Amino acid sequence: MISLSRHLSISLAVSLICFFLIQTILVGMEMRKLTEDRLISRLQDDMEGILASLSVTLGEAAKVDWDHIPDIFMRPFSGHYFHVRQGEHSIRSRSLWDSDLPVQAAGINRAVEGPENQQLLILSRSFVLHGEPLLLSVAEDTSELEATSLYFQERMIILSLAALLLLLVIQMWVIRRGLKPLAGLREELQQLERGKTDKLEHPVPAEISPLVEEVNRLLIVLQQRLLRSRNAMGNLSHALKTPLTLMFQVLERRQDDNECAQLLEQVRRIEKYINRELSRARTAGQSAGGVWLKPKDDVRDLVAVLETIYRKKINITLQVSEIIGTSADREDMMELIGNLVDNACKWAHGQVIIKVSQQPGLSIIVEDDGPGMKPEEKLLVLERGVRMDESMQGHGLGLAIVREIVDAYGGRLELEKSHELGGLKVSLYFPSLETN
């Protein structure tokens, strides 16, 4: 899964690193150029001073007025040198001691090795004084300037790294602050899943607002479709009830007729198919915004109705823990529990136990003291794709509806022998139906 925060952080970090790296290189180059320009400017000034101290007579060797030469050219190996070449005759600064400057062409010569392994920058110019050509070279040791430049670059790199780290921290803070509304939106989506709200209302940036509006519109459309589907199924059920009842009455009166008996069997099968498909269509599943607000009260009301129906035969014991609400459709849960309890009451000899609890998902257990189920029947119930209303005797449609709802909610259905009552124990567990 791609993290937007991580993607932005990495992209901006790479951009900042590239920026500071290029900046450091360019500033270092620019500083080196400025330093060299200043050094060349100083060499030009020295050259003009040396030229002013030269006296040249046609046909004679040039002479230097040493009184006008700066002291720095007089100290041995001071790092400042000059060399005048006039044919075979030459004049060296006393700072060269007994060394010579390497002969260089006119122009600027860099990184020339001089006395004491010094790195020199040499500026050479050709002149003609009083008809006599001569080459004047002025040099200066750049070691100290190189050290100063290197020190400046190291300091700049350290300051750039510190600034880079500071900007990265600020950048991460800005990104997290900018994405904070998305965290609130995620929490609201979780509340929507749990049924605490039926739409998204958390304030979001303008870029995300159209997406939130589309989600809210989709939720409304889904709720409207579910309502229309249930209404249509209810209308269809009501419309088919009267014709089917009439057909049953007519065919039951003529059961002695073989063809009418066969037709009656087909009509019963049609009724069974209709009931199954109507039940499947009414199942909402885990739709966003669906919530079962009062499980305890609803289950008690349902049991009260069933006790009225089976009051002379069955004793129903209800054990319900306190559940504030759960993210499931109320109609689905009521139909599921109703089918389970009704099926248990039909087969029980006299005792049915209902347990509804939170573990932390929703757990529903129904036990009876009836004959139970055969192992092969349990396998049919648990095997997906098997139409139990056709493959089973007796339990049929009730458990078929239960499994349809369990599958719609991603729950788990278990069938086993009841150790407490001796009959069938049906256990349902919905781990995703978290309570508030």
Image: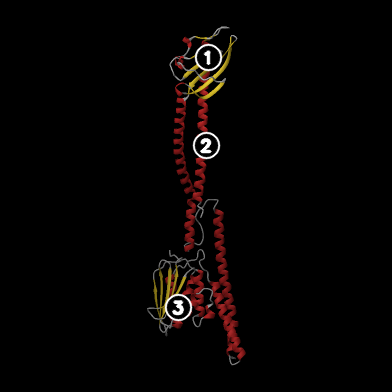
Mark number, residue 22: 2
Q: Is residue 94 visible?
A: yes
Residue assigned mark 1: 84
- Of the image marks 1 and 2, the number of the one nearer the N terminus: 2
Residue 104 place in picture, x, y as percent = 55, 20
10 Å crowding of disc 1: few (<14), some (14-19), many (20+):
many
Q: Earlier in the sequence, mark 3 or mark 1?
A: 1
- Using the rendered image of the protein, determine whether residue 309 is visible from the camera's viewpoint: no
Q: Which mark is residue 191?
A: none
Residue 33 lies, in percent from the top left, at 52, 27
| Marked residue nearer the N-terminal end (2 or 3) | 2
Mark 3: which secondary structure? helix
Q: Nearer the viewer, mark 1 or mark 2?
A: 1
Front disc: 3 or 1: 1
Question: Closest to the observer: 356 or 30?
Answer: 30
For residue 366, what is the image quadrant? bottom left
Q: Residue furthest bottom?
A: 256
Q: Residues within 10 Å of mark 2 (few under 14, many from 20)?
A: few
**Crowdedness near tag 3: few (<14), some (14–19) or many (≥20) residues, C-alpha within 10 Å:** many
- Amino acid type of disc 2? Ile
Q: Quadrant of residue 240?
A: bottom right
Numbered tag placed on residue 341 in the rendering: 3
Find residue 40 and report its horizontal and vertical position in percent.
Answer: 52, 22
Q: Amino acid at mark 3?
A: Val
Q: Looking at the figure, which quarter contains the C terminus?
A: bottom left
- Up/down of 206 relative to 73, above or below: below
